[in-house]
Image (cartoon, grey):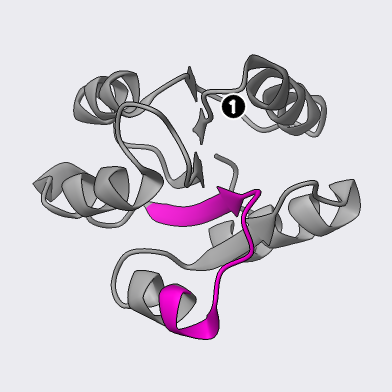
Amino acid sequence: MVVDDEKEVLDSVALLLESRGYRVVKACDGKECLEKVDAKPPDLMLLDIMMPDMTGEKVAEAIRKRPGAKKTRIVMLSAATLTKDEMKKMVCGQVVDFIEKPFDISDLLARVKKALGKGVKA
């Protein structure tokens, strides 16, 4: 699942992953994301931190409270540079990795592969 309020980012990341054989579900905000997670929790979520309705951190906290989604791996996408303390806070049970925007395509793909584990598709 890719969650981002910027349509261009949402569509480009989804297209990139789909072109590599991944099944992708898109959501443009926290509310839509949680509705889709309730319907079918994804293996992996690329989640924007800065969104207008709900921050990525709040979405991640809400996902962790859903029994069916506790195993969803979350990778945060951020245009803002986070401090080590901020990253450490989020990583504690919420997030497995961070990718700064603008991101390098090969780095994004490598981190997706790493987060999913060998041979697993989202």
Amino acid type shown at disc 1: Arg
Q: Quadrant of residue 34?
A: top left
Along the viewing direction, whichever of 27 and 5 lies nearer the viewer: 5
Residue 46 position within the rendered picture, expressed as x and y whole percent measured from the top left: 54, 44
Along the viewing direction, whichever of 81 and 89 lies nearer the viewer: 81
Say which residue appears at 69% left-offset and 61% top-offset. 111
Q: Secondary structure at mark 1?
A: loop
Q: Which residue is mark 1?
A: 23
Residue 83 position within the rendered picture, expressed as x and y whole percent measured from the top left: 54, 77
Residue 51 position within the rendered picture, expressed as x and y whole percent measured from the top left: 44, 33
Query: Looking at the figure, which quarter contains the C terminus?
Result: top right
The magenta region covers 73-86
Along the viewing direction, whichever of 13 and 48 lies nearer the viewer: 48
Q: Is residue 82 magenta?
A: yes
Question: Is residue 17 visible to us here?
Answer: yes
Q: Is residue 90 magenta?
A: no
Q: Quadrant of residue 80?
A: bottom right
Residue 69 position within the rendered picture, expressed as x and y whole percent measured from the top left: 24, 46
